[in-house]
């Protein structure tokens, strides 16, 4: 559709003054109307009321001071802060914030704003793109050249520098989302139009942009109005901006209608954990003194003369500024307030007597609307259908139909007429202009709602108006290049589906498909799916499958994918079934198999996921056994090993890509099955799928999934460190070479989750796993993203990432997974979150070794996993229970769960948790031997020590530290405290070098315990002091408190050797008192010579929390 064309509207010959004809005065299309008949009744009161509407601060001086103080703190180098303004509708929240625009500008800062609108939530990130657009405008104005080549060069240098800081991909992405970004930063609009946003999210681009434009010299106030209407995806972006540690030059101001919304909003932003300073400003009605000052300023009269009027106004409006303005308008319009002889006059007795005049202030506003010229009313109707804010060029586009008829003069007349109507609406306080000259907005939400209620349209008129607005928005979209207009066009056209003529339905389908792709690029999966549903509704079912087969196939598959990403699995299933029923070839069904496999995996349906993938592979002629024969696996593994060993890495990297589309589809489906079977603990199936993928790759060529297969092959070669390193590294090289995010995500997941940390410190895997999470979210591959983040959380527990940060990230992950109904990854993530909570003191019944609390219930989670036969979830639950049991000295529970893990068989969680698990098993075995003197425990402990030494010998730096730790436990059993101290110091030093803070703290605690038993006072102080400070640094509040309790309750012990003598003395193994006395000390065993002065310093540890 070109700019001069539009969908035809139904004739309405019997309603000549309808809004359908644009304006009553243009109905005859005879030429420009006489605009002189359109005028405002407001007189000079317009100016004074306008001054009031534009953010008078009478009665708001305290709030103004708090805003200024917050801005000054941020301006002086402090961190970003948040101001939350809350109060009833019309109380002046927006006016208070907007009043700071000039104040911030005078201080060479940026004031930018965006407003959330509940009626336009189908336009993703609308308010945030307004903020970015404001920034672009300000930068453009600041860097505007002034007829000077040097200035031109300076501007170009400035733009280039900013674009480099933003990044090329983010720049192209933002140019396709923010209308004025391309012109501000010199981005080629053609490149932006054809930019593929796959793999980059709006959140990522927004953060990069805000980071790039922010600097110490340029501070920014970001005002977001009506945040309670924000969609979930926008809240996540705001959350990310608030948590950006580099963001030290921004003051965020939010407005909310109700105070009870404040807690809900701030709980999402988690200010306490992030140490984000929040200032709450609750606005009430103006008092009589403020109203008196305000009226004196507006009416130009002395305050003493205004006082009686102020009391009446307060009684009528309760000090609500919006109602106050409406009340004054009603007094003026009804003759109670007059402008005569260059001054305002009124009769207070008459105003008091006219009590019925303004009992309903909203009704008075409706009366004002009714008194407007019909053309102004028509313009307001159009604007209210667009939204709270509306661009001028959509209104101008209403005249394009006249250009199609060659009548340029009439088109110009329409534009001029709109200008006149806007001017009147502004004078009457209905409309306000924005800083962006192309946009206008209603002065208040109540005005827009009153317009909609007061000027009702029949259903036909409403749909016809939506049709014309949709046409106008598309005409203003520059053939789909301006994304906001595409989204607006789709939204409007979808409200009038019944009026779309047959010959134009295909165009509307394309508009919706384009809008769906835009929403998808912004990670707004649910709105994207809704646009696709609208496109499908324009088609005639089975008939359309015949007439537009490829289009129907694409739309249904894409809708299923979007519903899966949004966690709406039932809707996904409906579209998949539609594809299965109507697709004519097996190959065409493959996209549906891909989506359905991922959907079932997210719902933790192990059997159904496997069956779906195997069924899809069978359609392509590839047979996979769910339970393969062992002899076949061994034969196939030997064959693949022979083929790979015969190829150099360069040979594999130089292989050509697979040409066959069926083989490519098979590789993708095999990749999905591989990803799920790994985490479902289906070891034999993993072997089968991996080898099948490698067989196809070595025969047909490389594909996007081959890196994942190589990464998984490196896992299968865990017993051969050299091969494990080789294929893990080869997988990463191939994924990077393919320049595709999907294989890189799976490769990161396998290589960094299972393989890479076999030869590098655990801490080196953080960045890659975090990248994997963000990549997966951007691609809509939530399952793989969640697995990467779960790996990240598990490794963070071993490496000592601040528990405060780890808890926040784990909570956010679980919240995201719960919102999207991702049951399987959620079941794996919750136990790690609960471990963190237990370490921080948030466990049920104050028992930190019991994995029940805010995040999960141990017994319920265990029963659910057993019911679904989900070995991976059981493994995670058992591992997390072992973790807290070891750290809090519940050795019996730890040993029970170690045996439970072994009964599960081999699951792939062993690989990314193996290091810590081996250490826990060794510690538990030695401790159980001390308690029971059963030789089987001693044998088990020495066996673990031997395994760790072998792994260390092959270059596993993490296992080297664990081997030293277990060896120190072995040495301690022999009773030589000099050697014991030396052995523990060696382990502690290695843990410190590897940055395994929790294990460093645990080793110090264990060493201190041994020294305490042997009455080695100075060494006891040394090790316990260091342990307490390390646990404090980690954020493990429970450990700090309990260790302090141990040192106070048992400051020393009479000398006794080890567990042999302990048993002879009849000391019981720790039971109910194990948390306080984990070392088996008798309560009467004290020495008065023990120096406890260091405890006074350690007591301060708890105050940290």
Image (cartoon, rainbow, N blue to C red):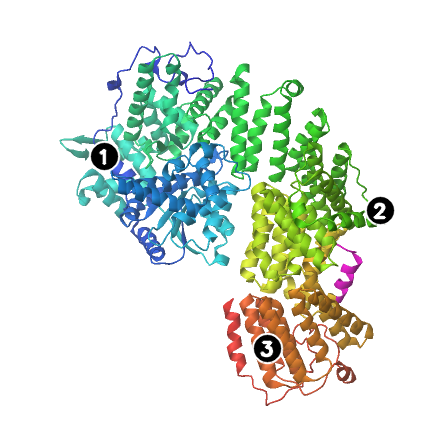
Q: Is residue 779 above or below residue 543?
A: below
Work out whether mark 1 precedes mark 3 in sequence or the reverse, and give the earlier one: 1
Q: Which label lies toward us, 2 or 1? A: 2
Q: Residue furthest left?
A: 341
Asked if the magenta segment contains residue 490, the reply would be no
Quadrant in the picture for residue 336 = top left
Q: Residue furthest bottom?
A: 1089
Can residue 621 be seen?
yes
Q: Which residues are magenta?
A: 895-907
Q: Is residue 8 above or below residue 226?
A: above
Other-residue count near label 3 (Cα within 10 Å), few / some / many at <14 / 14–19 / ≥20:
many
Work out whether mark 2 precedes mark 1 in sequence or the reverse, and give the earlier one: 1
840 displayed left or right of 606: left
In this view of the protein, which residue sits in the foreground, 428 or 409?
409
x and y percentages locating residue 594 in the rendered image? 68, 37
Q: CA distance from mark 2 to mark 1?
A: 89 Å
145 displayed left or right of 464: left
The rendered magenta stretch, by its main secondary structure, is classed as: helix
Residue holding disc 2: 632
Query: What residue do we see at 57% from left, 46% from top?
Result: 775
Task: Identify the secondary structure beneath mark 2.
Answer: helix
Work out whether mark 2 precedes mark 3 in sequence or the reverse, and give the earlier one: 2
Residue holding disc 1: 47
Asked if the magenta segment contains residue 897, the reply would be yes
Residue holding disc 3: 1024
Q: CA distance from mark 1 to mark 3?
A: 74 Å
In this view of the protein, which residue sits in the foreground, 128 or 215?
215
């Amino acid at each position: 559709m070109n700019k001069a064309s539009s969908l035809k509207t139904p004739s309405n010959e019997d309603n000549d003054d309808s809004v359908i004809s644009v304006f009553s005065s243009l109905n005859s299309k005879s030429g420009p109307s006489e605009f002189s008949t359109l005028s405002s009744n407001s007189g000079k009161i317009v100016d004074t009321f306008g001054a009031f509407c534009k953010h008078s601060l009478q009665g708001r001086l305290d709030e103004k001071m708090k805003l200024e103080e917050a801005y000054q703190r941020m301006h002086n180098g402090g961190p970003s802060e948040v101001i939350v303004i809350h109060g009833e509708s019309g109380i002046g929240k927006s006016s208070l914030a907007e009043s700071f625009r000039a104040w911030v500008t005078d201080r060479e800062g940026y004031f930018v704003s965006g407003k959330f609108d509940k009626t336009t939530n189908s336009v993703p990130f609308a308010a945030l793109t307004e903020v970015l657009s404001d920034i672009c405008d300000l930068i453009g104005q600041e860097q505007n050249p002034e007829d000077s080549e040097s200035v031109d060069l300076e501007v170009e240098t400035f733009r280039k520098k900013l674009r480099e800081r933003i990044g090329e991909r983010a720049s192209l992405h933002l140019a396709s989302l923010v209308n004025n970004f391309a012109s501000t930063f010199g981005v080629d609009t053609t490149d932006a139009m054809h930019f593929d946003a796959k793999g980059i999210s709006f959140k990522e681009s927004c953060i990069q942009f805000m980071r790039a434009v922010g600097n110490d010299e340029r501070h920014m106030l970001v005002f977001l109005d009506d945040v309670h209407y924000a969609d979930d995806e926008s809240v996540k972006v705001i959350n990310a901006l608030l948590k950006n540690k580099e963001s030290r030059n921004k003051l965020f101001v939010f407005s909310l209608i109700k105070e009870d919304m404040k807690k809900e909003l701030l709980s999402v932003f988690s200010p306490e954990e992030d140490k984000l300073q929040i200032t709450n400003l609750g606005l009430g009605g103006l008092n009589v003194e403020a109203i008196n000052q305000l009226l004196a300023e507006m009416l130009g009269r002395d305050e003493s003369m205004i006082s009686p009027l102020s009391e009446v106004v307060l009684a009528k409006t309760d000090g609500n500024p919006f109602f106050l303005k409406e009340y004054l308008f009603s007094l003026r319009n009804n003759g109670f307030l007059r402008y005569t002889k260059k001054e305002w006059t009124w009769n207070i007795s008459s105003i008091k007597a006219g009590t019925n005049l303004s009992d309903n202030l909203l009704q008075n506003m409706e009366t004002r609307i009714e008194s407007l010229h019909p053309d102004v009313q028509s313009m307001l109707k159009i604007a209210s259908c667009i939204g709270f804010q509306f661009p001028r060029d959509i209104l101008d586009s209403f005249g394009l139909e006249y250009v199609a008829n060659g009548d340029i003069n009439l088109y110009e007349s329409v534009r001029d007429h709109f200008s006149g109507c806007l001017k009147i609406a502004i004078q009457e306080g209905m409309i306000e202009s924005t800083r962006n000259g192309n946009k206008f907005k209603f002065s208040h939400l109540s005005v827009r709602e009153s317009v909609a209620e007061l000027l009702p349209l029949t259903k036909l008129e409403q749909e016809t108006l939506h049709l014309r607005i949709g046409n106008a928005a598309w005409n203003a979209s520059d053939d789909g290049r301006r994304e906001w207009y595409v989204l607006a066009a789709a939204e409007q056209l979808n409200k009038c589906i019944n009026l779309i003529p047959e010959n134009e339905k295909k165009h509307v389908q394309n508009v919706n498909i384009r809008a769906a792709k835009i929403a998808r690029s912004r990670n707004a999966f649910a709105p994207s799916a809704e646009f696709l549903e609208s496109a499908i509704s324009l088609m005639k079912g089975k008939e359309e499958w015949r007439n537009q087969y490829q289009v129907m196939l694409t739309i249904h598959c894409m809708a299923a994918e979007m519903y899966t990403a949004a966690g709406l699995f039932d809707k996904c299933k409906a579209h998949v079934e539609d594809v299965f029923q109507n697709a004519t070839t097996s190959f065409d069904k493959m996209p549906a198999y891909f989506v359905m496999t991922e959907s079932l995996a997210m719902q933790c349906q192990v059997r159904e996921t496997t069956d779906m993938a195997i069924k899809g592979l069978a359609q392509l002629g590839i047979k996979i056994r769910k339970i393969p024969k062992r002899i076949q696996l061994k034969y196939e593994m030997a064959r693949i090993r022979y083929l790979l060993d015969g190829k150099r890495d360069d040979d594999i990297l130089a292989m050509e890509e697979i040409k066959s589309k069926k083989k490519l589809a098979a590789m993708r489906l095999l990749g999905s099955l591989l990803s799920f079977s790994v985490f479902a603990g289906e070891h034999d199936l993993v072997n089968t799928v991996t080898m099948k993928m490698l067989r196809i790759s070595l025969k047909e060529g490389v594909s996007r999934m081959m890196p994942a297969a190589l990464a998984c092959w490196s896992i299968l070669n865990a017993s051969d460190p050299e091969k494990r390193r080789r294929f893990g590294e080869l997988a990463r090289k191939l994924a990077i070479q393919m320049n595709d995010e999907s294989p890189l995500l799976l490769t990161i997941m396998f290589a960094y989750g299972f393989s890479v940390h076999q030869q590098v410190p655990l801490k080196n895997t953080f960045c890659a796993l975090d990248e994997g999470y963000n990549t997966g979210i951007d691609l809509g591959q939530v399952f793989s993203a969640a697995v990467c983040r779960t790996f990240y959380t598990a490794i963070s527990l071993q490496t000592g990432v601040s528990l405060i940060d780890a808890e926040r990230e784990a909570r956010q992950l679980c919240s995201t997974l719960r919102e999207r109904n991702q049951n399987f990854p959620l079941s794996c993530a919750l136990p790690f979150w609960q471990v963190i909570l237990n370490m921080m003191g948030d466990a049920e019944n104050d028992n930190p070794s019991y994995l029940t609390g805010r995040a999960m219930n141990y017994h319920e989670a265990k029963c659910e996993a057993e019911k679904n036969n989900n070995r991976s979830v059981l493994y995670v639950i058992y591992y997390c229970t072992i973790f807290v049991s070891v750290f809090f000295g519940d050795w019996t529970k730890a040993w029970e769960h170690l045996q439970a893990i072994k009964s599960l068989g081999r699951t792939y969680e062993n690989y990314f948790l193996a290091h810590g698990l081996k250490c826990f098993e060794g510690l538990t075995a030695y401790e159980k031997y001390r308690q029971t003197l059963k030789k089987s425990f001693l044998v088990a402990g020495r066996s673990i020590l031997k395994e760790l030494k072998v792994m260390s010998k092959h270059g596993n730096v993490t296992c080297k530290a664990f081997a030293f730790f277990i060896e120190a436990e072995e040495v301690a059993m022999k009773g030589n405290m000099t050697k014991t101290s030396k052995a523990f110091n060696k382990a502690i030093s290695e843990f410190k070098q590897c940055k395994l803070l929790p294990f460093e703290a645990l080793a110090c605690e264990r060493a201190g315990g041994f020294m305490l038993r042997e009455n080695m006072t100075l060494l006891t102080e040394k090790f316990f002091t260091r342990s307490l400070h390390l646990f404090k640094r980690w954020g493990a509040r429970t450990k700090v408190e309990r260790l302090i309790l141990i040192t106070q309750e048992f400051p020393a012990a009479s000398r006794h050797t080890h567990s042999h003598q302990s048993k002879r003395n009849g000391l019981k193994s720790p039971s109910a008192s194990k948390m306080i006395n984990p070392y088996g000390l008798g309560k009467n065993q004290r020495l008065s010579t023990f120096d406890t002065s260091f405890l006074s310093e350690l007591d301060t540890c708890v105050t940290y929390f």
